[in-house]
Amino acid sequence: MSEFKFEIIKKIGVLSKSDSGWAKELNLISWNEREPKYDIREWSPDGGKMGKGVTLSKEELRALKESLNKMEL
């Protein structure tokens, strides 16, 4: 399995936290030294392990925001 690099450019917010300490976060991350993208995924308490997640471009994040604004919560 090939290695990959990542750099958290900006921590934006914690969406939730489990009893085990893992936190679902929204961050701006550069994967393999590419242009940073917005990223939602779970991180271990020490930040050394990550779960599966989803990355979004600025345009995709904007579309998600517009969709969420239309919802009644």
Image (cartoon, rainbow, N blue to C red):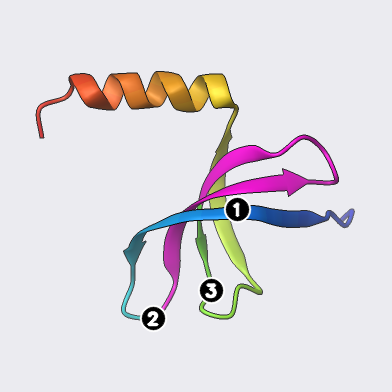
Q: Which mark is residue 20?
A: 2
SS under mark 1: strand
Marks 2/3 in contact by CB < 8 Å: the verdict is no
Q: Quadrant of residue 30?
A: top right
Principal secondary structure, stretch drawn in magenta? strand
Image depth: mark 3 or mark 1 in front = 1
As shown in the figure, which amino acid type bears the numbered disc 1? Lys
As shown in the figure, which amino acid type bears the numbered disc 3? Ser
Residue placed at 85% from the left, 45% from the top? Answer: 33
Marks 2/1 in contact by CB < 8 Å: the verdict is no
Sooner in the amino-acid sequence: mark 2 or mark 1: 1
Q: Quadrant of the C terminus?
A: top left
The residue pinned by badge 1 equals 10
Horizontal side of residue 20 vs 31, given as left or right: left
SS under mark 3: loop
Q: Which mark is residue 44?
A: 3
